[in-house]
Amino acid sequence: MPGAYLLALLVSAAGVAALDARGRLVLWRRPRRAAVAILIGTAFFLIWDAVGIATGVFVKGGSPLLLGIDLAPHLPLEEPVFLAFLCYLALVVHAAALRRLHTRATRGRRA
């Protein structure tokens, strides 16, 4: 089913965004800073991918789950979407972990 991987990425990103919105962790706390961090992270990993593709380390496998649209040789459309999702997920997990640690430290001081 072409597009299933992209659909899975978008549904997963929507789930992470819902958790983010509920906890006001990243995008709902500081949207401009979060967007810049996601863009910088995505750009970094795209450059990493370009180097890997140029050296022959990364190649696109044939999968019926991809749309079949390539942005460059061996760089499917889904790759930057995945990289942006990865960066967003990392930011949300980091913010949630920091909040959890802060909550624990605050409770520890009260006891």
Image (cartoon, grey):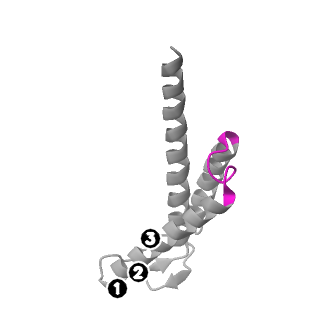
> Which amino acid lies under the numbered mark 3 shown in the image of this protein?
Phe
Whether tag 1 and tag 2 are in contact, CB under 8 A, the answer is: yes
Q: Is residue 47 left or right of residue 100?
A: left
Residue drawn 66% across the image and 53% down it: 14
Q: Nearer the viewer, residue 105 or 99?
A: 105
- In space, the residues marked 1 and 2 are separated at their CA atoms by 6 Å
On the image, the x and y values in percent for residue 101 come to 48, 33
The amino acid marked with disc number 2 is Ala
Extreme-top residue of the structure:
111
Residues at badges 3 and 1 in contact (C-beta under 8 Å)? no
Q: Which secondary structure type mostly characterizes the magenta part of the structure? A: loop
Residue tagged by mark 2? Answer: 50
Q: Which element type, helix, strand or loop, lies under badge 1?
A: helix
Q: Residues within 10 Å of mark 3 (few under 14, many from 20)?
A: some
Task: Answer whether labels 2 and 3 touch (C-beta < 8 Å).
Answer: no
Q: Is residue 57 above or below residue 109?
A: below
Residue extent of the magenta highlight = 22-31
Q: What residue is at 47 percent from the left and 79 percent from the top?
A: 75
